[in-house]
Image: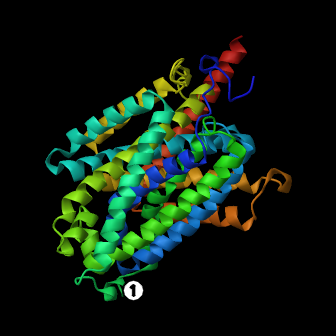
Amino acid sequence: MNAESSPPGAGGMKRRLGLSDAVVIGLGSMIGAGIFAALGPAAEAAGSGLLLALALAAVVAYCNATSSARLAARYPQSGGTYVYGRERLGDFWGYLAGWAFVVGKTASCAAMALAVGAYLWPDQIHAVAMAAVVALTAVNYTGVQKSALLTRAVVTVVLTVLAVVVVTALTSAHADSARLDIGPDTTAAGLFQAAGLLFFAFAGYARIATLGEEVRDPARTIPRAIPIALGIALAVYALVAVAVLTLLGPRGLADATAPLSDAARATGADWLVPTVRIGGAVAALGSLLALILGVSRTTLAMARDRHLPHVLAAVHPRFGVPHRAELAVGAVVTVLAATTDVRGAIGFSSFGVLAYYAVANASAWTLTEEEGRPNRLIPAIGLTGCATLAFALPTSTVVSGAAVLVLGAVLYGLRRVTTASSNDSH
């Protein structure tokens, strides 16, 4: 019996998603995160060099996407780099990639939930964030096909709002192209830090790879979907960044809590402000939806291998989704949404995801030509770029991120020792 027709009760998931579904799920993750959450912190670090930082992040993201796409075609399973690292580098590296992804993207979920609260009801940001997590966990629980349909609607709304913002901003009498000039406030350290923060916005294509067991013809679909989603997102980011900078300048953008709302207000088009706020909330919801989807799939893969509690490996007999993993992820994110702030969550998430993609590039390096290896320069640049951007992040983020990776390694070692002792006793 093939994967397409295998019954859900057999522990497999249904292959329901086509190319457009996969692209939309990736876009839903990237658009919400990048435009409505990451531009402000990145502008604070890069100053007038924000567009250069965006280009730098895009180069690293392209290398990571190419490596991930080649690996996904070779290993079309749920789990993404957790699977690739395990198969190409060994069990520990796969585990560490999965650990970094689950931890980093759980922080991303919290950041997006808080972004929903910031746009919808700033005075009750944490309460709104928690409600959003509960609602979208329920949507994911009832099936990935419904999630894909909802994400498609979200992406359509957000792209429409962003198009209106860009056109209004660039045709405004208040826009000034001189605000795009690079000044002395730009430093190499600031550029790398900003690129690391902006990488948070590009990492949505990971959700495509983690859906390996739910995509039709994954060996063909995933390698096509990843670069398409990345290319569309980059074009949107560049247009919006240019539009906002011409109105607010790098300093105004860095100080803005809701940059697109502030840009809309700066055009004098007050009618656009509530539209942008709704668009921001919808974008963050779309990103949160896809993030919960991806984290739960990697949790499923790790639980199957008993790196996480095996009870989380269950697939719902009716809905064909990893329902226990989704509930567990939803519960953790709800707690984080009640206790954290957006900017700290973005930095922490970036560190974890850059570590994840470092393993992906190292894995892609080991592919042979017969296995579809990319040009060796691509994983080399990707690996070097991931390491550089990760350690260029704020010191507190690097320290906390490294500590979490070390904790993961310790837990892995303890599990191996416990398993070996148990085997010896038998």
Residue 243 to residue 139: above or below? below
Q: In which quarter of the image is the N terminus?
A: top right
Q: What element carries label 1?
A: loop
Where residue 20 appears, x then y in whole percent? 56, 49
Q: Which of 289 and 89 is in front in this view?
A: 289
Q: Which of 345 and 34 is in front in this view?
A: 34
**Displayed quadrant of residue 421:** top right
Task: Tell me the residue at 30%/68% (across/down).
Answer: 165
Q: Name the residue under label 1.
A: 182
Residue 253 to residue 61: above or below? below
Is residue 118 shown left or right of residue 106? left
Mark 1 neighbour density, 10 Å: few (under 14) some (14–19) many (20 or more): some
Look at label 1 and name its amino acid: Ile
Task: Tell me the residue at 70%/17% (across/down).
Answer: 423
Task: Tell me the residue at 45%/34% (across/down).
Answer: 146
Where residue 234 appears, x then y in whole percent? 49, 66
Q: Examine the rendering and report whether any part of residue 346 can be seen.
A: no
Task: Tell me the residue at 52%/27% (across/down).
Answer: 321
Q: Examine the rendering and report whether any part of residue 314 can be seen.
A: yes
